[in-house]
Image (tube, rainbow, N blue to C red):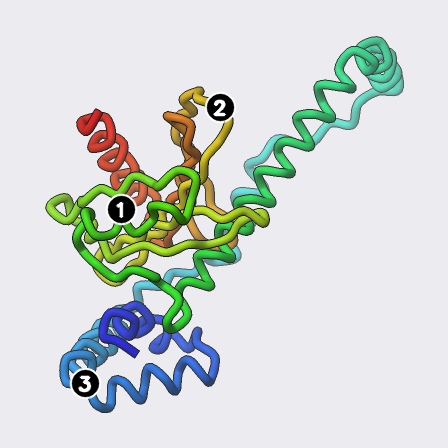
Amino acid sequence: MTCDEAEILLQALIDGELDAGHAREVETHVATCPKCTALLKDYQEMSKAVADAGARYTAPLALRRRIEASLPPVQQPSRRAVLRGFAMGSAVSAIAATGLVAIVLRNDDEMRIQSEIVSAHLRSLQAGHLTDVLSTDQHTVKPWFNGKLDVAPPVIDLTAQGFTLIGGRLDYVDARALGAVVYRRRSHVINLFVAQTASTEHRAAKIETVQGFNIRRWSERGLNFWAVSDLAKDELADFGERFEAAMHAAG
């Protein structure tokens, strides 16, 4: 295990989120690495300080009761209103059915893809899975993808903006090979997944939370982008905006 890999997993080790095998690998590395030993100690002291400060807050039951009491009563619809609603629904259902089914299927497909994106992100955090090419040099990472994918993903150095390029790898989502460009923000990993799409339409960025991870997704220049991390939404949004700005600046 390298220091880069251990550093990513130290927080998970402290929080008890690693399985026995990965925990043992990290502990074995830390035992022989003064740098990671010191970093682990810093993280432990930080976690203890947060816990001792009582940063966690649980709202009292009385607050819930006051909120419920302040809500307006729910009125049951009359029989006439219900029947009128059914009549209107029947009149438009034949027209809307095809479009509605298409929207539902499209939403389900997007949710499935995003779930697979999160699974790929989690796999990458396992020891030895984060990068196939380990480099902070964009001119090393980008050529590595050539010949492995139909379109190599854009690789942009954002170190000066606080997002360090780590490297890249091939990954598989929805049974398709795609590129993953990897960045780090402090101890947080950002996987930027990039896949070719038939559409050249620009799709504005949208951030959603899936299984506890934030995903910023957007499309442009015939590529779909998904940036996934446990970073806060505002920081992930900042990453995406800086990446897009750098892409536009590069032409």
Q: Please provide percent x and percent y for residue 236.
A: 31, 44
Judging by the rendered image, the residue that carries numbered circle 1 is 142
Q: Residue at x 44, y 22 (%)?
A: 200
Separation of disc 2 and disc 1 at Cα?
23 Å
Q: Quadrant of residue 5?
A: bottom left
Separation of disc 3 and disc 1 at Cα?
31 Å
Residue 49 seen from this side:
no
Q: Please provide percent x and percent y for residue 198.
A: 51, 26
Judging by the rendered image, the residue that carries numbered circle 2 is 199
Q: Nearer the viewer, mark 2 or mark 1?
A: 1
| SS type, badge 2 | loop
Q: Earlier in the sequence, mark 3 or mark 2?
A: 3
| SS type, badge 1 | helix
Judging by the rendered image, the residue that carries numbered circle 3 is 33
Q: Residue at x 27, y 53 (%)?
A: 183
| SS type, badge 3 | loop
Residue farthest to the front? 147
Look at label 2 and name its amino acid: Ser
Q: Is residue 72 above or below residue 68?
A: above
Q: Is residue 42 above or below residue 174?
A: below
